[in-house]
Image (spheres, grey):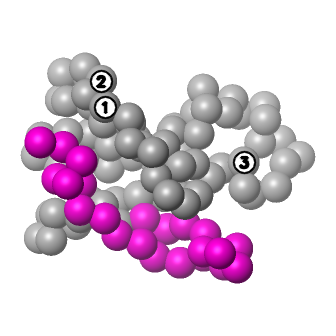
Amino acid sequence: MSVASVTSDDDYIYALYNGHVLEDAVGSRDDILLSNKLLVFDWEGTPCMAIKLDRPIKSITYDKKEHLILALGLNEKKDFALYSFPIKKYIQ
């Protein structure tokens, strides 16, 4: 199974999970590398939660200053766009 992108903050590791194996990507379109599921782990590797995102995402990073996950994903027209969401909204 595949993780498309990984980022972290001081408390957690965030992995964009797409569930595909590498063989699925061979000969497939780029959309196989997209995901709408974000897995959250603590620094010991313990799974904490899974967050379902409202759009397909290709990659993520963490903005430490604003405490946001920044994500490159597809908009309604299937063009790439930059999105952000406050991760602390999901993690209490």
x and y percent of residue 49 in the render? 31, 31
Q: Earlier in the sequence, mark 3 or mark 2?
A: 3
- Quadrant housing residue 75: bottom right
Vertical placement of 39 versus 63: above or below?
Answer: above
Q: What is the three-letter code of the residue carrying label 1? A: Met
Question: Residue 90: within the magenta?
Answer: yes
Quarter containing the C terminus: top left
Give the residue drawn at x 65%, y 75%: 76
x and y percent of residue 52 in the render? 45, 45
| Contact (Cβ within 8 Å) of mark 1 with mark 2 | yes
Q: Nearer the viewer, mark 1 or mark 2?
A: 1
Q: What is the three-letter code of the residue carrying label 2? A: Pro
Label 2 crowd (10 A; few <14 / some 14-19 / many >=20): few
Q: Which residues are magenta?
A: 71-92
Label 1 crowd (10 A; few <14 / some 14-19 / many >=20): some
Vertical placement of 63 versus 32: above or below?
Answer: below
Relative to the observer, which residue lies in front, 85 or 34?
85
Q: Is residue 75 visible?
A: yes
Q: What is the three-letter code of the residue carrying label 3? A: Ile
Please, what secondary structure does the residue beneath circle 1 have? strand
Q: Which residue, given by chain and number where applicable, does mark 3 sit on?
A: 32
Q: Which residue, given by chain and number where applicable, does mark 1 sit on?
A: 49
Left or right, residue 27 beside residue 34 = right
For the residues marked 1 and 3, what is the alpha-carbon distance in whole angstroms?
23 Å
For the image, the number of numbered tags is 3
Relative to the observer, which residue lies in front, 85 or 18?
85
Give the residue drawn at x 55%, y 60%: 55
Give the numbered dot on residue 47: 2
Label 3 crowd (10 A; few <14 / some 14-19 / many >=20): some
Give the residue drawn at x 18%, y 43%: 91
